[in-house]
Amino acid sequence: MNRFSRRNFLGLTAAAGTTLAAKTIFLDPEPLWAIPTAVAPNDRVRFGMIGIGMQGSGLLGNSIALPGVECVAACDLYDGRHTLSREITNSPALPVTRRYRELLDNK
């Protein structure tokens, strides 16, 4: 007769899941995929941002935080947002323009 009941099985799996979750949360504060690694030049993504408003500035900040992603130019109608894009990218020499066609024509 099998003495391993459904209740014992559920208790055992709950304990194993709790142990695994505790190890992941407390012992490994950063997941393995978040560790910065060297990115090959062919795997880099370079982009130009059009519109550095409320949504654009958030997207710009989140995208350049990823490894291998770089903003090379920005476009907006307002001078204050040109300054904001340079601050977000931490690049005082970031090319900025008011005309989005200039950004699109720049290869």
Image: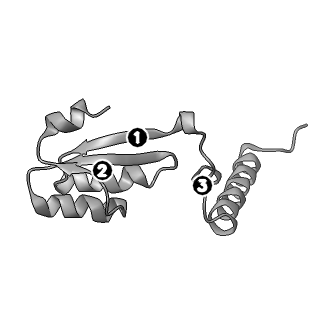
Q: Earlier in the sequence, mark 3 or mark 1?
A: 3
Q: How is the image coloured?
A: one colour
Q: Quadrant of the C terminus?
A: top left
The reply to whether callout 3 and callout 2 are in contact (CB within 8 Å) is: no
Mark 2, residue position: 59
Q: In the displayed orientation, state which residue is furthest to the bottom.
A: 26
Q: Residue at x 27, y 34 (%)?
A: 106
Taking 8 as reference, is 51 left or right? left
What mark, if any, has residue 46 been given in the picture?
1
| Label 2 CA crowd tier, 10 Å (few <14, some 14–19, many 20+) | some
Where residue 89 sits in the image (x, y, percent)?
35, 59
Mark 3, residue position: 36
Nearer the observer, 2 or 50: 50
SS for dot 1: strand
Q: Earlier in the sequence, mark 2 or mark 1?
A: 1
Where residue 10 sits in the image (x, y, percent)?
69, 48
Nearer the observer, 57 or 104: 104
Q: Residue at x 63, y 49 (%)?
A: 38
Q: Residue at x 19, y 52 (%)?
A: 52
Mark 3, mark 1: which one is toward the viewer?
A: 1
Q: Amino acid at mark 1?
A: Arg
Taking 91 as reference, is 21 left or right? right
